[in-house]
Amino acid sequence: MEKFKLQSKEFIELNNLLKVMGLCESGGAAKAFIAEGRVNVNGYLELRKRYKVRKGDIVEFQGHKIIVE
């Protein structure tokens, strides 16, 4: 389980989170994975590339689980 701290931000877009965490080589690759239905947020399939991930959300992608703090 990995953690991501928002610090002073209210949210981070889902595609940016995958890129920042090093799970995708680029934002374009992250968008493609999301569009293919390979990402879950809080246990539900998420197809919105720019979904606003906020504190308390749990993102799952390719065996990685990220908790946003």
Image: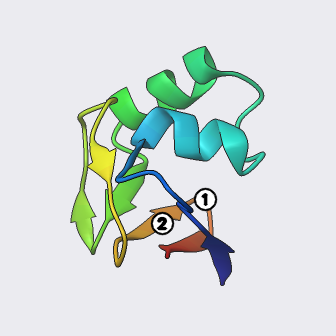
Q: Name the residue under label 1.
A: 62
The residue furthest top is: 28
Q: Name the residue under label 2.
A: 60
Compared across the picture, whether 43 is left or right of 39 comes to left
Q: Nearer the viewer, mark 2 or mark 1?
A: 2
Counting from the top left corner in percent of width and height, residue 19 is at: 66, 37
Quadrant in the picture for residue 45: bottom left
- The amino acid sitting under disc 1 is Gln
Q: Is residue 26 above or below residue 15?
A: above
Counting from the top left corner in percent of width and height, residue 26 is at: 70, 22
Callout 1: 10 Å neighbours few (<14), some, many (20+)?
A: few
Residue visible at 48% across and 34% down?
A: 15
Quadrant in the picture for residue 56: bottom left
- The disc at residue 26 is none
Residue visible at 57% across and 15% down?
A: 28
Counting from the top left corner in percent of width and height, residue 3 is at: 64, 76
Cα separation between marks 2 and 1: 7 Å
Compared across the picture, whether 44 is left or right of 13 comes to left
Circle 2: element type:
strand
Residue visible at 60% across and 21% down?
A: 27
Counting from the top left corner in percent of width and height, residue 50 is at: 32, 30
